[in-house]
C-alpha cells in the first residue's frame, strides 16, 4: 500500500521512484575501537542478526583477492542490487550507445491532409519515454502533412511480453509495482486527485506528468467502493474491456492526491498520444491493440538517450520498470523472442555465466531484472564476480563504477591511516522488508580501492510477510525496525572495511 500524499508537486525525480540507498547520505564512519580489534561477530549480534542472515565479501578488483568474507557462498535475497547484473548484461548485449526507438508507422497513402489507412504507434521498450517525446512524435506526424486518419490508431507493443505487474505478491497499488510493456510512458505512474463530494462519492481526476506538462488520463476510471471491498487498504484495482478501474475506499481523507501504477500501460500510452495529437490538430480514433504490418512505413520516430545514460539513472533512482524494460529488450536481442520476466532474467543470467565460467553459480536465481521478488537469490561471491566483470570493461567513455551513484562518506574518527580521510563509495543498494543489500566499490581512507557486496536477509520472515493479506505487506513496525538495524550493520561493516584495508 502506498501512502496518501497531500503536499508537494510532481517532479521527474519523484516519478523515477526510490533513491539509490534510503538512509545513506553523508555519513561519518564509525570510530574504531581503541582497545580491541573489530569483531564482525559482535557487530552482527549487536544489531540482532543470526550468523546465517548476514553474508559479505570484500575483494581487490585488480586481481580478485578476497580480503574478508562471511557466508560468501550462501544465497541471499538481493532486492534492487539485482539491477547491477541486469545493467552489466544489458550494456554488454546492446552496447552503451543503444537507443530505444518509438515510431509512428503508416499503412496507406496521404491525400488531402489525411492518411487513408491505419496509423501504428510501435513501442521499442523505451524505459524513459515521456509525454514530451509523444509531443515530438505528433509534431513529426503533422510535418508530414497529416491532420487526420481514416483508419484506426493501432498500438503495437509486441516487441516484449506485456506484464500487468512486476511482482504479483506486491500490492497492486504500489507505485513501484507497475505494469510492463514495450509502450510505457512516464514510468507508468499516474497522479490521482480526489475530493469527497458527499454520500460516499468522490470527484476524481488523474494525470500523467512530466516536469513540463500534465496530461489528463482517459484510460482509467474511478469510483467509490465500500471499505470492505479494498480488503483493508485504500484502493482496489479492476480491469475491464474499457480499461483499468480503481475503487477508492471511504477510509481515504476527504481530499488528497496519491500516485498509482498503471497495469495496462500500452493502452494508456496510446490514449495519451491521441489526446496530444488532438492538441496538435490531428484527429485520431479510439486506439486498439494490433501489430504493424511489414509494409508499413515510418512517418515519425523518437530515439531515447544512449543506454549508458539511462543505466546511470537506473542505478541512481532504482526505478523497477526501467530495469525490467532494459533487461527484456536485451533478452529479446539475444533470443528474438518476447520472454516472460522470469525467462528474460534467466537469459541474461546465462549470458553472465557464460562470461564467468569459473564461478560457482549454484543458487543463483535472477527471478526478474529489477530485484522486486522474494524468489531472487544471489551469493556475495557471485555479486563480486559480476562487479569484477564490469570493472574490467569500459562502456563508451565510462567505466561501470562511474555509472554507479557516488555516496559521500565522511572522514573517520580515531587513529590510523583512515583518520580524517574522506572515503568515496559508489554502490547500488537493495531494500525490501527482511532483505537488504549493498554492492559496489570503495576508495578507502588508505588510498586502496576495494570491491564489496553485503547482504542481510531473513527469508522465513519474508515468506510470512508474503503470505499476509495484501494491505499488510507494506510491513509492520517490526519489519521497519529490521530494516533500520540492517542498514546500521551495513554502515558499520563498510566503515570498517574502508579504514581497515
Image (spheres, rainbow, N blue to C red):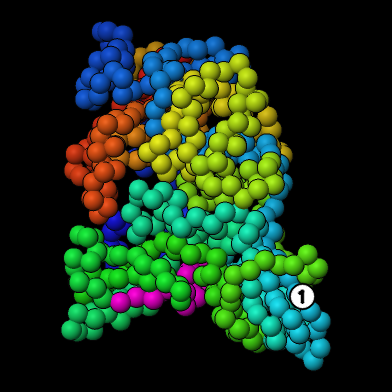
Position above or below: 60 against 129: above
Q: Is residue 400 visible?
A: no
Query: Residue 276: x, y in percent?
Result: 59, 78
Residue 277 placement, left or right of 6? right
Is 100 colored magenta in this rendering?
no
Q: Is 365 located above or below residue 120 in the figure?
A: above
Give the residue drawn at x 57%, y 54%. 161
Q: Give the left or right position of residue 328, taking residue 52 as reference.
A: right
Q: Residue 497: x percent and y percent?
A: 42, 19
Examine the image and state in which quarter residue 407 appears.
top left
| Residue in the foreground of this view, choosing between 14 and 478 | 478
**Residue 236 position (above or below residue 271):** above
Q: Residue furthest front?
A: 241
Q: Residue at x 56, y 22 (%)?
A: 385
Measured as percent of width and height from the top left, residue 352 is found at 61, 29
Asked if residue 211 is among those painted magenta in the image, a careful observer would answer yes
- Where does label 1 land, which residue? 107
1 and 167: which one is in front?
167
Helix, strand or loop status at disc 1: strand
Tell which residue pokes out farthest to the top in this image.
36
Mark 1 surroundings: few (<14), some (14-19) or many (≥20) residues within 10 A:
some
Residue 413 position within the rendered picture, expressed as x and y whole percent measured from the top left:
34, 22
- Report the span colored magenta: 206-223
Residue at x 23%, y 19% (from the top left corner): 45
Amino acid at each position: 500500500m502506498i501512502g496518501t500524499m497531500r503536499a508537494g508537486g510532481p517532479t521527474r525525480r519523484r516519478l523515477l521512484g526510490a533513491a539509490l540507498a534510503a538512509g545513506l547520505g553523508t555519513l561519518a564512519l564509525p570510530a574504531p575501537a581503541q582497545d580491541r580489534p573489530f569483531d564482525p561477530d559482535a557487530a552482527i549480534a549487536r544489531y540482532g542478526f543470526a550468523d546465517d542472515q548476514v553474508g559479505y565479501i570484500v575483494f581487490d578488483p585488480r586481481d580478485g583477492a578476497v580480503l574478508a568474507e562471511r557466508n560468501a557462498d550462501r544465497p541471499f535475497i538481493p532486492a534492487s542490487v539485482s539491477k547491477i547484473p541486469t545493467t552489466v548484461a544489458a550494456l554488454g548485449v546492446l552496447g552503451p550507445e543503444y537507443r530505444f526507438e518509438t515510431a509512428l508507422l503508416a499503412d496507406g497513402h496521404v491525400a488531402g491532409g489525411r492518411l487513408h489507412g491505419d496509423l501504428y504507434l510501435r513501442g521499442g521498450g523505451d524505459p524513459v519515454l515521456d509525454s514530451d517525446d509523444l509531443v515530438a512524435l505528433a509534431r513529426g506526424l503533422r510535418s508530414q502533412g497529416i491532420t487526420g486518419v481514416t483508419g484506426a490508431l493501432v498500438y503495437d507493443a509486441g516487441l516484449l511480453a506485456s506484464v500487468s505487474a512486476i511482482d504479483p505478491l506486491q500490492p497492486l497499488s504500489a507505485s513501484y509495482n507497475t505494469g510492463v510493456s514495450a509502450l510505457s510512458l512516464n514510468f507508468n505512474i499516474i497522479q490521482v486527485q480526489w475530493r469527497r463530494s458527499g454520500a460516499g462519492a468522490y470527484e476524481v481526476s488523474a494525470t500523467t506528468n512530466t516536469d513540463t506538462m500534465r496530461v489528463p488520463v482517459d484510460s482509467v476510471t474511478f469510483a467509490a467502493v465500500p471499505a470492505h471491498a479494498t480488503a483493508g487498504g485504500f484502493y482496489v484495482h479492476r480491469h475491464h474491456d474499457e480499461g483499468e478501474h480503481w475503487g477508492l475506499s471511504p477510509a481515504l481523507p476527504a481530499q488528497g492526491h496519491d500516485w498509482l501504477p498503471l497495469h495496462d500501460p500500452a493502452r494508456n500510452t496510446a490514449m495519451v498520444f491521441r489526446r496530444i495529437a488532438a492538441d496538435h490538430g490531428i484527429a485520431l480514433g479510439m486506439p486498439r491493440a494490433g501489430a504493424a504490418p511489414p509494409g508499413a512505413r515510418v512517418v515519425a520516430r523518437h530515439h531515447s538517450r544512449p543506454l549508458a545514460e539511462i543505466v546511470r539513472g537506473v542505478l541512481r533512482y532504482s526505478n523497477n520498470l526501467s530495469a525490467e524494460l532494459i533487461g527484456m529488450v536485451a533478452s529479446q536481442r539475444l533470443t528474438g523472442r518476447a520472454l516472460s520476466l522470469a525467462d528474460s532474467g534467466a537469459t541474461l543470467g546465462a549470458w553472465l555465466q557464460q562470461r564467468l565460467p569459473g564461478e560457482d553459480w549454484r543458487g543463483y536465481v535472477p527471478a526478474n531484472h529489477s530485484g522486486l521478488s522474494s524468489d531472487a537469490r544471489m551469493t556475495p561471491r557471485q555479486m563480486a564476480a559480476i562487479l569484477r566483470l564490469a570493472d574490467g570493461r569500459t562502456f563508451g567513455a565510462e567505466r561501470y563504477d562511474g555509472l554507479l551513484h557516488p555516496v559521500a562518506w565522511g572522514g573517520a574518527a580515531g587513529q590510523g591511516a583512515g583518520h580524517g580521510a574522506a572515503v568515496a563509495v559508489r554502490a547500488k543498494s537493495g531494500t525490501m522488508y527482511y532483505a537488504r543489500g549493498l554492492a559496489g566499490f570503495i576508495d578507502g581512507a588508505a588510498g586502496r580501492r576495494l570491491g564489496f557486496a553485503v547482504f542481510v536477509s531473513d527469508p522465513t520472515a519474508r515468506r510470512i510477510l508474503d503470505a499476509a493479506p495484501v494491505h499488510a505487506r507494506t510491513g509492520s513496525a517490526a519489519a521497519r525496525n529490521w530494516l533500520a538495524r540492517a542498514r546500521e550493520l551495513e554502515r558499520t561493516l563498510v566503515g570498517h572495511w574502508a579504514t581497515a584495508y
